[in-house]
Amino acid sequence: MTVETRPVPKLHRAWLIAGAAFVALLASAGFRAAPGVLIDPLHEEFGWSRTTISSAVSVNLVLFGLFAPFAAALMERFGIRRVSATALTVIALGAGGTVFMTASWQLVLCWGVLVGLGTGSMAMGFAAMVAARWFVRSRGVVTGVLTAAGATGQLIFLPLIANLAVGSGWRTASLVIAIAALAVVPVVLLLIRDHPADVGTTAYGAPAGAEVVRPVPKTGSVRRALSVLRQAARTRTFWLLAVGFAICGATTNGLVGTHFVPAAHDHGMPQTTAAGLLALVGVFDVVGTIFSGWLTDRIDPRILLGVYYALRGLSLALLPQLFTDSVQPSMWAFILFYGLDWVATVPPTVALCVRAFGDAGPIVFGWVFACHQLGAAFAASAAGLVRDQLGNYTLAWYSAAVLAIIASVASLAITQAKKPVAVLAT
């Protein structure tokens, strides 16, 4: 009797690349989790106002966003692996350099410029590039998983940073972040590859018989990024996506990510408790973003964005009534509801960029993400100013709720492209 055995199918290399990218994004998220829990310690030690500290956060957020499209173009020129390894090193230098600060301009340099450039290179454009190059099937899910890496990094680092800042001082917290970023550099260099052709394969889910083609590196990274922007800016779709994503940044990283902890502390809640709540947003965001990626493969992304922004506006309108000196059931409900929605907007936004702009989609998304961070930077500074002038954040929460409704309307107004803008793919 002959027993037929079938070879066990090998795991496609794309999943290893995605795993390494997840770890890299996880590490780069560490210092982006820091501002909310370090505002009060820096204020107490140096006497800097919240407006001054928030301005450094704003520089970080602006560079984080504006450098993203150039980073995507640099990845086309020099490769994903080299650019991401360099970015992690820059993050480590910026985080480590903060321990020597004596003046506020040094906070802007280290926390704003260096960390902003480093995290900008490891922004969502990096996730979009990995997903677009390595996946045809399950691209939406992979985009959701890689996007969730930032929230998972927040989950891991935020409680740690808060406890270190309270127990050992904020300098210890900064050094831990620097070490974590450096530790991931060897993982990136050993595991990540720039394109499926580098290992003699095709993207996961590519049609049978698809040719293994090694792309020719594109020169003129800055020119490429600016050219893509110039042509994308001629379309209505780009501006609607940009407006919506700018409001997305204002209502997440800029406002809640930066000011939730000090706002809760204003109402008597311990800083470590508030940081734990913000970390839980990261827990639920992992679930929400991955599920959003799954939905993006099945439902019109425009409808998803419209629903996500409308629900976010509702939750932010209720938040000012939920703050107390302890965690009440209503606050738990907000954390769950808001967490599921935190960056669930990313997979449908990436999908719309790729559908509308083809191969240039990751760079276009980089520019859309730049708008996200401009919105975040504005909200971070504006909310700090509101707190300094009025003594509370109430106006900031209500303003964010109104903006979220505007983003919902803008998303639903996007016209579905019949085919990508071909000129951008050349």
Image: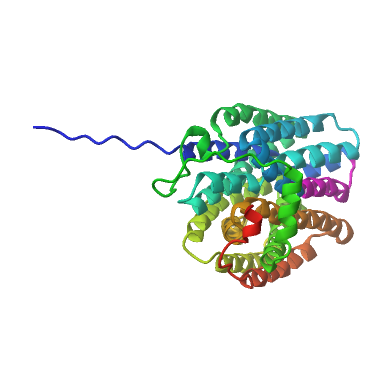
Task: Compare residues 201 and 151 and report the one nearer the observer.
Answer: 201
Q: Quadrant of residue 214?
A: top right
Task: Compare residues 295 and 277 and report the one nearer the observer.
Answer: 295
- Looking at the rendering, the stretch of residues picked out in magenta corresponds to 47-64
Which secondary structure is most common in the magenta stretch?
A: helix
Q: Quadrant of residue 402?
A: bottom right
Task: Compare residues 116 and 269 and report the one nearer the observer.
Answer: 116
Q: Position of residue 227 (x, y in %)?
A: 74, 53
Farthest left residue? 1
Figure label count: 0
Q: Is residue 324 magenta?
A: no
Which color scheme did the rendering employ for the protein?
Answer: rainbow
Q: Position of residue 216 (x, y in %)?
A: 61, 40
Q: Position of residue 292 (x, y in %)?
A: 52, 58
Q: Is residue 202 visible?
A: yes
Q: Position of residue 153 (x, y in %)?
A: 61, 41
Q: Quadrant of residue 341?
A: bottom right
On screen, residue 378 versus residue 276, left or right, reads right
Q: Is residue 372 visible?
A: no
Q: Residue at the location (58% across, 37% down)? A: 194
In the displayed structure, 149 sits above or below 240; it is: above
Q: Quadrant of the N terminus?
A: top left
